[in-house]
C-alpha cells in the first residue's frame, strides 16, 4: 500500500496526463501549460530517460530533401505535402526562438542531397515555386556542383542544396525541454509503465503496480509504441540504425546530407561522420521496436561510408546505435481526438525534431 503522502502528491488527480516524454510529449506539455497555466500536467514515461527516437536519432533539424518532397507530392498530393513542409519549417523556427544555438549545438549549415540521375533536377523549378510562400526564398533548392569536390564527394553526380536545414544535439534539446517543463511546473513519473487505460467520466491510467492516476484528459505521445494502446491506427515501427566514426583527419564534409529519398542520411559532428539509414535494404527486419543493430545493415552502412562519403580515407567506428521511428501509409502525423477525453499526437515519420513543436500547439488548441 502507498502512503497518504504519495497519494496526495505523485499519484494525485491531474487535469491532463501525457504518455511519453519524447519530443512530442514535451512540446505538447509546454504548449498546453503556456496556453492554460492553471492546468496541472503530468508526463508519464516508462524509461528512465526519454527514448524511442528522441534521444536515439541522427540529430537532424530536418526540413526535407528535394526527392523526398517530390515523392510525398506524388503520394499524398501537394496540399498535404505543403502542410507538412510548413509544419517542419515553422517547427525549426520555433526551436531557434526558444533556445540559443549554442545551448543545443544547433548549426544551420544547410542541407544537401546527393542525386545520381537527372530526373529530380527537372522538378526543381516547380518545387521552388510551391515552397516560395513557406520559406520566403525564390530558390529553396539549388544545384551546387562546385561543392561536390569541396566536400570530398567525388563519386556523386549532382548535389542539391537547401539552406533551411541544420543539425543539433538531440540530447541537449531534450534536456532544455525538460528544464522548460520544470520551469512551467509540469510534473513527471519516469520509469513508470502504463498497463491499461479506462475512460468513464474521467480517465484512469493504470500501472503495472497496483497504482493508478486519474485525469480529466489523456494524450498519447507514444509514436512507434502506440499500437499497444491504439490498435486501429496504422502505425508501423521503423528502426533507424546509426553509426558514428572516430575523428577523421582533414574532414571536408560540413552540413546535413540525404541520399535515396532520405533513406540514407549523414552529417558531420565536429570532425566525425554520423551516418544512418539504409532500412530500405531490409524493410521487414527493421519494422521492429527492438533497440538493436544488425550485422547486415551495419556492414552495409560501413560500405556506404567507404564508397560514397569517405572514399580513399581510413576511418574507425566509435559508436553504433538505433532509434525507433513511426511510419504509416503516408507521412502526415496522426493528431486527433480519439474520444471525449482522449487525444493522440503520433506517427511523426522520422521528422519529430521539426514537427513536434507545432504538433504540441495543435493539441493545445484541441483540448
Image (tube, rainbow, N blue to C red):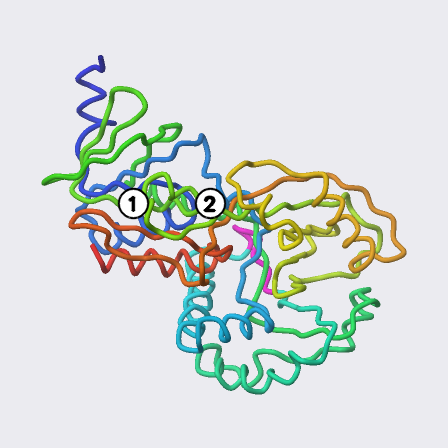
Residue 174 bears which disc, if any?
2
Dot 2 surroundings within 10 Å: few (below 14), some, or many (20 or more)? Answer: many
| Relative depth, front residue between 4 and 124 | 124
Left or right position of 156 against 38: right
Marks 1 and 2 in Cβ contact (< 8 Å) = no
Q: Main secondary structure of the magenta part?
A: loop
Pointer 1 local density, CA inside 10 Å: few below 14, some 14–19, many at least 20: some
Please report the residue visible at 24 percent of the width from the left and 23 percent of the height from the top. Answer: 211
Of badges 1 and 2, the one in the foreground is 2
Circle on res. 160: none
The residue under the point 65% across, 80% down is: 142
Q: Residue furthest right?
A: 312
Q: Residue at x 59, y 73 (%)?
A: 66
Q: Is residue 80 above or below residue 328?
A: below
Q: Which quarter of the image is occupied by the N terminus? A: top left
Secondary structure type for disc 2:
helix
Residue 202, horizontal then vertical, whole percent: 13, 39
Quadrant housing residue 194: top left
On the picture, is 231 further left or further right than 129?
left
Q: Is residue 342 magenta?
A: no
Q: Secondary structure at mark 1?
A: loop
Pointer 1 or 2: first along the chain:
2
Pinpoint residue 39: horizontal percent, then vertical percent: 18, 45
Counting from the top left corner in percent of width and height, residue 201 is at 9, 40
Counting the numbered discs, the total is: 2
| Picture disc at residue 184 | 1
Relative to residue 75, is residue 350 depicted above or below? above
Residue in view at x 57 percent, y 54 percent:
168
Alpha carbons under labels 1 and 2: distance apart:
15 Å
Of all residues, the one furthest to the top in this rendering is 1
Magenta span of residues: 102-108
Amino acid at each position: 500500500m502507498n502512503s497518504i503522502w504519495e497519494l496526495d502528491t505523485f499519484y494525485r488527480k491531474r487535469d491532463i496526463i501525457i504518455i511519453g516524454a519524447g519530443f512530442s510529449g514535451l512540446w505538447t506539455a509546454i504548449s498546453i501549460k503556456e496556453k492554460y497555466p492553471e492546468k496541472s500536467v503530468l508526463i508519464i514515461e516508462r524509461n528512465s530517460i526519454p527514448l524511442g527516437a528522441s534521444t536515439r536519432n541522427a540529430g537532424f533539424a530536418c526540413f526535407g530533401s528535394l526527392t523526398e518532397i517530390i515523392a510525398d507530392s506524388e503520394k499524398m498530393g501537394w496540399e498535404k505535402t505543403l502542410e507538412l513542409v510548413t509544419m517542419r519549417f515553422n517547427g525549426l523556427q520555433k526551436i531557434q526562438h526558444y533556445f540559443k544555438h549554442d545551448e543545443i549545438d544547433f548549426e544551420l549549415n544547410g542541407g544537401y542531397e546527393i542525386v545520381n540521375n537527372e530526373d529530380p533536377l527537372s522538378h526543381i523549378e516547380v518545387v521552388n515555386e510551391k515552397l516560395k510562400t513557406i520559406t520566403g526564398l525564390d530558390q529553396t533548392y539549388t544545384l551546387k556542383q562546385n561543392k561536390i569536390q569541396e566536400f570530398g564527394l567525388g563519386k556523386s553526380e549532382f548535389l542539391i542544396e537547401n539552406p533551411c536545414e541544420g543539425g543539433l544535439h538531440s540530447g541537449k534539446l531534450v534536456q532544455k525541454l525538460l528544464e522548460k517543463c520544470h520551469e512551467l511546473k509540469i510534473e513527471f513519473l519516469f520509469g513508470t509503465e502504463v498497463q491499461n487505460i479506462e475512460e468513464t467520466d474521467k480517465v484512469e491510467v493504470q500501472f503495472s503496480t497496483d497504482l493508478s492516476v486519474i485525469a480529466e484528459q489523456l494524450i498519447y505521445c507514444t509514436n512507434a509504441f502506440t499500437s499497444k494502446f491504439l490498435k486501429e491506427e496504422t502505425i508501423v515501427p521503423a528502426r533507424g540504425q546509426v553509426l558514428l566514426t572516430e575523428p577523421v583527419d582533414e574532414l571536408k564534409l560540413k552540413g546535413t546530407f540525404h541520399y535515396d529519398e532520405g533513406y540514407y542520411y549523414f552529417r558531420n559532428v565536429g570532425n566525425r561522420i554520423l551516418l544512418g539509414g539504409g532500412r530500405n535494404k531490409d524493410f521487414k527486419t527493421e519494422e521492429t521496436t527492438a533497440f538493436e543493430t544488425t550485422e547486415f545493415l551495419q556492414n552495409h552502412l560501413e560500405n556506404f561510408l567507404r564508397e560514397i562519403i569517405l572514399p580513399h580515407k581510413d576511418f574507425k567506428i566509435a559508436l553504433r546505435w538505433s532509434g525507433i521511428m513511426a511510419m504509416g501509409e503516408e507521412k502526415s502525423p496522426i493528431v486527433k481526438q480519439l474520444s471525449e477525453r482522449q487525444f493522440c499526437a503520433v506517427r511523426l515519420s522520422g521528422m519529430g525534431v521539426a514537427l513536434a513543436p507545432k504538433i504540441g500547439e495543435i493539441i493545445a488548441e484541441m483540448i
